[in-house]
C-alpha cells in the first residue's frame, strides 16, 4: 500500500494563509459551521432548491486539461476538500481509504472514474465500508474559452440525494457511538460544496499564477 506525503507541501508556509482556503486544519468544524450557515439564505426555500440535487459551479483561472488531470487523481481530494485526509490505496486497485474528519473515527472509501475525452471526474465514495460506493460526486471540467469566451476552466459539480443519506444502510460497519451520519449534513451540502469549490479554485489559481504544476510532484511519483 502507498502512503501519501503531506498535502499542499509545495505551497510551503503560504498554505496556512492562502486567501480563500478553508480546511479543517485552520478552520475546525465549530469555526467552519458559522461560515457555512452564513452562506445559507432564508429568502429561498432551501429544501426545495436543494432537496434532491446539490449543484455548485464556478470559474477557475487555470488551464482545463491540467485542472482535469489534477482532479482525476483521487489524492487531490486531500488538498481541496474540507475534511478528507490521509489517503492510502487499499489492496484493491483504484480503491482508496481516508479519514473523513466530519465524523469521529470515520473512514471514507473512494474510487475515481474519470473520462479524459469529456473531462468528467466522478468520485464514488462511502463512509465506513468500500463494498458499496453509493455517495457519487459528479464533476466536469469545461474549457471556459468555449462557454465564457475567456481562458480558464468552468467546474460543474452535482450531488444527488441517494436514499441512504437518510439512514445508514450498513450500521454494523460504523464506529461505535459516532454521533453523526453523513446525511445529517445534507442541508449544508450546497454551502459546504461551494466552500470546497472555493478551495479548489484558490489552490489551482495559486499554482497556475506562480508557474507551478497543478498536479504536485508528490502525486506524480
Image: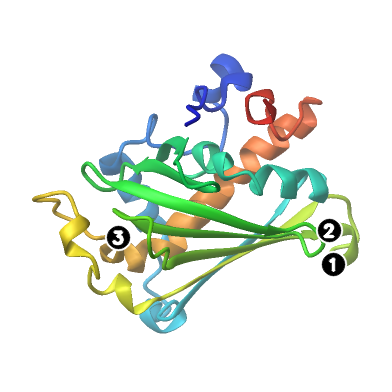
Above or below, 18 against 92 in this view is: above
Q: Name which quarter of the figure residue 187 lies in.
A: bottom left
Q: Marks 1/3: CA distance?
A: 34 Å
Above or below, 187 against 110 in this view is: below
Q: Marks 3/2: CA distance?
A: 32 Å
Residue extending farthest to the left is 177
Question: Is the C-beta separation of discs 2 and 1 under 8 Å?
Answer: yes
The residue beneath circle 2 is 143
Residue 82 can be seen, yes or no: no
Above or below, 202 against 210 in this view is: below
Left or right: where does residue 219 sit relative to residue 128? right
The residue beneath circle 1 is 147
Q: Secondary structure at mark 3?
A: helix
Q: Secondary structure at mark 1?
A: helix
Q: How many marks?
A: 3
Above or below, 78 against 39 in this view is: above
Q: Residues within 10 Å of mark 1 (few under 14, many from 20)?
A: few
Question: Is the C-beta separation of discs 3 and 2 under 8 Å?
Answer: no
Left or right: where does residue 32 sit relative to residue 110? left
Q: Which mark is residue 182?
A: 3
Q: Marks 2/1: CA distance?
A: 7 Å
Residue 100 location, x and y as percent?
34, 45
- Looking at the image, which is closer to me, 195 or 134? 134
Amino acid at each position: 500500500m502507498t502512503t501519501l506525503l503531506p498535502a499542499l507541501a509545495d505551497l510551503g508556509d503560504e498554505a496556512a494563509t492562502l486567501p480563500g482556503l478553508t480546511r479543517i486544519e485552520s478552520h475546525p468544524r465549530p469555526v467552519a459551521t458559522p461560515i457555512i450557515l452564513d452562506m445559507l439564505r432564508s429568502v429561498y426555500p432551501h429544501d426545495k432548491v436543494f432537496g434532491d440535487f446539490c449543484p455548485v459551479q464556478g470559474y477557475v483561472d487555470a488551464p482545463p486539461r491540467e485542472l482535469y488531470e489534477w482532479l482525476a487523481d483521487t489524492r487531490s481530494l486531500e488538498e481541496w476538500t474540507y475534511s478528507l485526509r490521509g489517503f492510502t490505496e487499499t489492496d484493491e486497485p483504484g480503491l482508496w481509504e481516508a479519514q473523513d474528519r466530519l465524523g469521529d473515527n470515520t473512514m471514507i472509501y473512494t474510487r475515481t472514474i474519470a473520462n479524459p475525452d469529456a473531462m468528467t471526474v466522478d468520485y464514488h465514495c462511502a463512509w465506513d465500508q468500500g463494498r458499496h460506493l453509493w455517495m457519487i460526486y459528479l464533476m466536469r471540467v469545461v474549457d471556459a474559452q468555449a462557454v465564457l469566451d475567456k481562458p480558464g476552466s468552468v467546474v460543474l459539480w452535482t450531488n444527488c440525494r441517494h436514499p441512504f443519506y437518510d439512514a445508514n444502510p450498513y450500521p454494523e460497519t460504523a464506529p461505535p457511538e459516532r454521533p453523526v451520519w453523513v446525511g445529517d449534513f445534507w442541508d449544508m451540502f450546497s454551502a459546504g460544496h461551494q466552500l470546497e469549490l472555493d478551495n479548489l479554485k484558490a489552490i489551482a489559481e495559486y499554482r497556475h499564477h506562480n508557474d507551478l504544476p497543478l498536479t504536485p510532484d508528490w502525486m506524480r511519483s
